[in-house]
Image: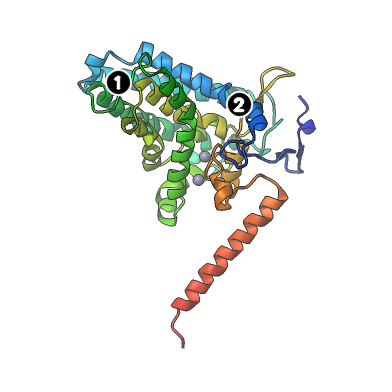
Amino acid sequence: MDDLKFGTRDKRGNWTPNEPAGTAPVFVWPPRPLAVLKWLPGYFFPYNILFFLSALAWWNWVIPPVEVMQTLAWGWVLKLFAVNAVAVFLWYFAFELQLYIRRAQGNRFKYNGKFPADAPSDVFWFRSQNLDNVLRGFLSGVPLWTAVQVIVLWAFANGYAPWLSFADHPVYLALLCLVVPVIHEFHFFCIHRLIHTPLLYKWVHSVHHNSINPSPWSSLSMHPVEHLLYFSTIFYHLIIPSNPIIAIYQLHVAGFGAVPGHVGFDKIEVTDETTVDSHAYIHYLHHKYFEVNYGDGLIPIDKWLGTFHDGSKDSDEQMKARFQAKKARANAKKSVGTPAE
Ligand SMILES: [Zn+2]
Ligand SMILES: [Zn+2]
């Protein structure tokens, strides 16, 4: 497909979409019902529906009976870990294989014209972004993902969390399913903004930002503290009345949903004529500029706080003005703190 119908490519091969990145038309005033109707199918398809179906599959085929989960035992915990690891491998590798190993669509729709494998760097283990990212994902990402999952399932099984059944509360639980991505967005924004504070950035979040040109495996390339904070989104379901299937769905939105956001391509070509949007542009800009787009735009918190970047020149100017104002404030503080000679 001709990506130049949808964007422009600069001399370095970086592709920029014509349409600036937009936030979802919900949480806006005045309400925009027509825009919501147009936006809604993309809210469900393909990603959130897939993650919900995967949660159902886990519940039916992977998660043991409640009596088993009442006791913590290596048997069911290791089985869950193994299934999570295989699923992460398959889902992440599917994108990696198609877009970064086979390079099936070359750099069509690719924001950054370069491929990480072509640019070894000292910031990564073994100088390889891929190897570094994969190892971090499997050494701490999947284990901590499984750990929070086990804690929550054990709590449900022992009656420590309010467990509603779909038979008794179909409407409430359907609405809760609808807001799972909203909970994710709120939680992600909060923990992400937190780890962008100077000390936590230096010790924790800089690991994730080593991947300035992210690829699928960058999604779970985090410091273990960030993994824990990121996956703790599942704990909301120990507080609000919920159901373990929805708790697993919440975790899948975080764990599997991170991939489209780091895929590095704006559209994924399925056939010559069909593409699927990745919705990756907002988070790609975060990896490029660091101090913009702490959220993914489902709730426009960045817009409210003035940290939104839509990829346009206007946004660039606003970002530069914000950095300069910040620098001026820091310098003013420094000069106040310096004793007069
Ligand atoms: Zn990221
Ligand atoms: Zn960040």
Secondary structure beneath label 1: helix
Q: Look at the picture and state if 59 lies above or below 224.
A: above
Q: Which residue is mark 1?
A: 78
Residue 140 place in picture, x, y as percent: 37, 34
Residue 261 place in picture, x, y as percent: 56, 34
Measure how far apart labels 1 and 2 are at the Cα level: 38 Å
Q: Is residue 28 left or right of residue 9?
A: left
Q: Which mark is residue 40?
A: 2
Q: Amino acid at mark 1?
A: Leu
Q: Look at the picture and state if 206 lies above or below 245.
A: below
Residue 297 place in picture, x, y as percent: 57, 39
Q: Is residue 6 left or right of residue 123?
A: right
Looking at the rendering, in which quadrant would you find the N terminus?
top right
- Residue 314 can be seen in this image: yes
Q: Look at the picture and state if 146 lies above or below 335.
A: above
Q: Residues within 10 Å of mark 2 (few under 14, many from 20)?
A: some
Residue at x 35% of width, y 31% of height:
240
Q: Which mark is residue 191?
A: none
Secondary structure beneath label 2: helix
Residue at x 44% of width, y 51% of height:
201
